[in-house]
Amino acid sequence: MQPFELSLTEASRAVRARELSPVELTESVLARIAAVEGRLGAYVTVAADAALAAAVRAEREISGSGPRGPLHGIPMALKDLIDAERMPTTASSHVRAGHVAERDSRVAERLGAAGAVLLGKTHTHEFAYGLTTPQTNNAWDHSRVAGGSSGGSAVAVAAGGATFAMGTDTGGSIRVPAALNGVVGLKPTYGLVPRTGVTSLSWSLDHVGPLARTVQDVALVLSATAGHDPCDPVSVSGPVPDRFPGGDLRGLKVGVPRNHYFDRVTPEVEESVRGAIERLAELGAELVDVEIPMARYIQAVQWGLMVPEATAYHERSLRAAPDLYAADVRILLEAGELTSAGDYLRAQRARTMMRDAWARMFDGIDVLAAPTVPMTAAEAGQEAVEWSDGTTEAVSDSYVRLCAPANITGVPALTLPVGHDRAGLPIGMQLMARPFHDATVLRVGRVYEESVGGAGRLAPLAA
């Protein structure tokens, strides 16, 4: 096994045991990027020289005073919305061409303090306003979409071009690409990971979180990045354990949705996710049927919040240089100018009601288990999907439909691989819990992952 094939947990263990040096690990990952990047397009910027210099420093520090923690010497990537000092942050947009960050974002600062090695910046759907990341190809099938908007981060991890990566999630932008590329992604509780120095899409829905190859990996990254930041007005502190006991799930109640989450999903997705839920029952969990409250309003609330907030953020640049935006993003930003204050306030009111209704739902369960996305990766350029009930849905709408509730309510949501369709494409299951119970979804995901084996393998078509 080559070093780039190691999961974060495996690589960290080898580095701390002095069986693998940070330089060897970083060189292996950089060589992997060089080998596959031409087919994948995961990166905007690869800072190879800076990464190797950081790896040399990490190796020297570990040899001297020992590792700072599990991320010391581990190569990682940041989504191109997340500032890193003296490195471009373009948001994969011509609007931001030439923009270089003057200082680290809080996330980059904390990862740097943990000793992580920054490889570079990964592509996002322009300004995170989309669910496909058109610059990037799926790691399992290069003719299919990567998912978005953190598509570059997911593909880099799935292909061995980063041991872990950071993304952002406004309506599924960590979980969608993670599910479509067969990796693990976590949208933490709203405010748990600070957003200072991160380009915003929709301030009341934006989250920052990790993508990696195993549940234990994302837990380690969450532990290093979470915590209160006075510069982020919604930042909060919460319990963030980085390791979880194995064993069974006795005493745990898992909610199985009767509505919304299994509506208009492919048979293969439904079969794989229901099989994974049954596996949770075999591990001791009690399955409880639940009704998803206010399901008919989910997408209206998501778009009612996101569209005007995004337009407000881009107001000046949209008027100054509209032609620099990609057509799909520009249309959405211009649509936001037509949203009335009354519509926005009604969406805010509905969000409050939805949060309260979800809190009551979680009074009877510990975790909600459901599909992450209703179908596997679409063909590049595919605009719509036809469902068996005769309805047609835009690809982007289908991908956001099952992820949006966790953004609206702010609850933690974890996606992990649970199977493949007939074409061999990954299928993801989503685990959600009440706010600040991130440890619960991580524990359940970890126990499931250990019970089925095979976690952390690379996408075979990226070899």
Image: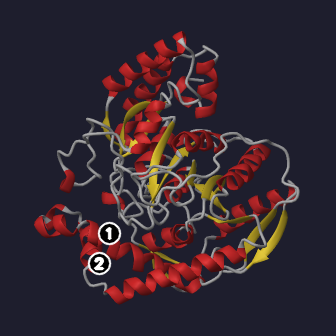
Please identify the residue farthest to the bottom as the structure is shown. 342
The dot on residue 366 is none
User: Above or below — where is 167 with respect to 67?
Assistant: below
The dot on residue 336 is 2
Badge 1 element: helix
Q: Position of residue 437 (x, y in %)?
A: 67, 57
Along the line of sight, the residue nearer the viewer: 374 or 257:
257
Along the line of sight, the residue nearer the viewer: 55 or 258:
55
Badge 2 element: helix
What whole-number distance in Å separates the C-alpha atoms at marks 2 and 1?
7 Å
Circles 2 and 1, Cβ within 8 Å, touching? The answer is yes
State the residue position of label 1.
310
Whichever of callouts 2 and 1 sits on the residue coming sooner in the sequence is: 1
Q: Determine the residue positioned at 52% across, 26% down.
A: 72
Q: Determine the residue positioned at 46% across, 59% down.
A: 173
Asked if residue 1 lies left or right of residue 39, the reply is right
Please identify the residue farthest to the top as the structure is shown. 64
User: Above or below — where is 409 with respect to 340?
Assistant: above
Q: Determine the residue positioned at 64% across, 24% down.
A: 13
- Mark 1: few, some, or many residues within 10 Å (few <14, many ≥20)? many
Along the line of sight, the residue nearer the viewer: 19 or 301:
301
**Which quadrant, please, contains the N terminus?**
top right
Q: Position of residue 268 (x, y in %)?
A: 66, 65
- Mark 2: few, some, or many residues within 10 Å (few <14, many ≥20)? many
Q: Position of residue 356 (x, y in %)?
A: 62, 78
Q: Position of residue 307 (x, y in %)?
A: 35, 75
- Disc 1 marks a residue whose amino acid type is Ala
Asked if residue 294 lies left or right of residue 45, the reply is right
* Image quarter of residue 271: bottom right
The reply to whether residue 41 is in sight is: yes
Q: Determine the residue positioned at 51% across, 79% down.
A: 351
